[in-house]
Image (spheres, grey):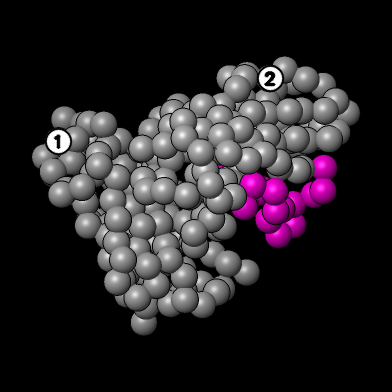
């Protein structure tokens, strides 16, 4: 099973700042089968990024994904108030699909 | 507009059974793999099971293998999860979600396993 480790566990920033979230895989994802999701309290997760760097439909361009091998990053270039949420990475390279434990982005 | 509506969640005793449903609309359901993902209270996301568009390929997390059964009815645009031998650690919100990249999610249905 591929274990995804996200860091930091909690990230405290202010609107307008840049956020960098990390996701490290326990083995190399030799294809770009990594996605990022945003979840707000009481809501279902929402797909932000798939294929490591492709934005899902309707996702603002302040969200970007990058990385390869075992190290992946979600960057939010300038935080908006609605971006404060929990973010999960997920690999769909191998079964079982696994998620990271999440990064809470707080004000 | 894509809509996924889960139902069937309830309070059930350990060892009991429950059947979850997910009604889909707004897209060509029969063309997509569909998945169940769960989230225990205050915890992260856990993939549970996936079924391909024609039901030819089915997979389960080890934690539910042998106890849960995923199925679909393309004529009814519906997904199901038969949950048997339920345990306390199956308590979670269960979401259905579409495709390989989990593009769209329902609002979830709460399953509580407790005596």
The disc numbered 2 marks a residue on which chain?
Answer: A
The disc numbered 1 marks a residue on which chain?
Answer: B
- Say above or below: B64 vs A27: below
- Say above or below: B102 vs B46: below
Of marks 2 and 1, the one in the foreground: 2
Magenta part of the chain: A42-62
Determine if residue B106 is in view: no
Looking at the rendered structure, the secondary structure element under dot 2 is: strand
Numbered label tally? 2
Whether tag 2 and tag 1 are in contact, CB under 8 A, the answer is no
In percent of the image, x 25 and y 39: which residue is there? B63
Mark 2 closeness class: few <14, some 14–19, many ≥20 residues within 10 Å = some
In this image, B48 relative to B68: left or right? Answer: right
Distance from disc 2 to disc 1, alpha carbons, whole Å, reads 38 Å
Which SS type dominates the magenta stretch? loop
In this image, B20 relative to A82: left or right? Answer: left
Residue B55 drawn at (x, y percent): 31, 71
**Mark carried by residue A26:** none
In percent of the image, x 14 and y 36: which residue is there? B14
Looking at the rendered structure, the secondary structure element under dot 1 is: loop
Q: Where does label 1 land, which residue?
A: B14
Tell which residue pokes out farthest to the right in this image: A16
- Which quadrant of the figure contains the N terminus of chain B? bottom right
In this image, A3 relative to A14: left or right? Answer: left
- Which quadrant of the figure contains the C terminus of chain B? top left
**Mark carried by residue A11:** 2
In percent of the image, x 26 and y 31: which residue is there? B89
Q: Which of the 4 image quadrants contains residue A3?
A: top left
* Magenta span contains residue A53: yes
Q: Which of the 4 image quadrants contains residue B90?
A: top left
Residue B71 drawn at (x, y percent): 28, 66
In percent of the image, x 75 and y 35: which residue is there? A75
């Amino acid at each position: 099973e591929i274990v995804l480790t996200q860091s930091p566990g909690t990230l405290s920033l202010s609107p307008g700042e840049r956020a960098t979230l990390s996701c490290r895989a326990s083995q190399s994802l030799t294809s770009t089968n990594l996605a990022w999701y945003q979840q707000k309290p009481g809501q279902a997760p929402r797909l932000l990024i798939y294929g490591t760097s492709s934005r899902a439909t309707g996702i603002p361009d302040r969200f970007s994904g990058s990385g390869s091998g075992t190290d992946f990053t979600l960057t939010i270039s300038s935080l908006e108030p609605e971006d404060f949420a929990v973010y999960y990475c997920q690999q769909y390279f191998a079964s079982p699909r696994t998620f990271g434990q999440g990064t809470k982005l707080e004000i | 507009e894509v809509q996924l509506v889960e139902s069937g969640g309830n309070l059930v005793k350990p060892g009991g059974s429950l059947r979850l449903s997910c009604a889909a609309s707004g897209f060509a359901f029969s063309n997509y793999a569909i998945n169940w993902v769960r989230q225990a209270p205050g915890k992260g996301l856990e993939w549970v099971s996936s079924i391909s568009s024609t039901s030819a390929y089915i997979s389960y997390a080890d934690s539910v293998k042998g106890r849960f059964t995923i199925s679909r009815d393309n004529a009814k645009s519906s997904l199901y999860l038969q949950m048997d031998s339920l345990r306390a650690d199956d308590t979670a919100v269960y979401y259905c979600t579409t495709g390989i990249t989990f593009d769209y999610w329902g609002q979830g249905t709460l399953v509580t396993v407790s005596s």
